[in-house]
Image (cartoon, rainbow, N blue to C red):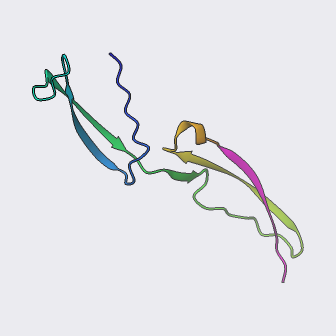
Amino acid sequence: MCVYVDMCYIAEPGKYEAKIPLLLNGELNCPYRYLSIKGILRGPSLVFSQPAVVFAAVPLNVEVSQDITVIPLDYPRYNFAMCTFNAPILFNM
């Protein structure tokens, strides 16, 4: 027997429990046993490779850049993507 539980339709992260009746011969009034399942649904979040971006002091009108990696956590697998991008910034007065 294989049981798959999809928690995609639950709106709020948290702990969940369910008691599923196992029926023999279709007898709804008298379940054979109960299957208890417990699960934790975590809310998706984004983690950055660096908690802060610090740029070196440079003269005005000089472009500087920093590589930042964004890591998604607890998203469904088909949405997983880790991306690194270069963020150029031009300091101007």
Q: Is residue 87 above or below residue 57?
A: above
Q: In the image, residue 31 lies at what x, y percent?
A: 13, 25
Q: Is residue 89 magenta?
A: yes
In the image, what residue occupies the spot 29% across and 46% down?
15
In the image, what residue occupies the spot 88% across and 69% down?
62
Left of 77 or right of it: where is 60?
A: right
In this view, the residue farthest toward the right is 61
Q: Is residue 76 above or below residue 69?
A: above
In the image, what residue occupies the spot 41% across and 36% down?
6
**Frontmost residue, 28 versus 7:** 28
Residue 30's quadrant in the figure?
top left
Q: In the image, residue 84 lies at what x, y percent?
A: 71, 48
Q: Is residue 1 magenta?
A: no
Q: In the image, residue 33 lies at what x, y percent?
A: 14, 23
**Frontmost residue, 60 versus 15:** 15
| The magenta segment | 82-93
Quadrant the N terminus occupies: top left
**Frontmost residue, 76 versus 49:** 76
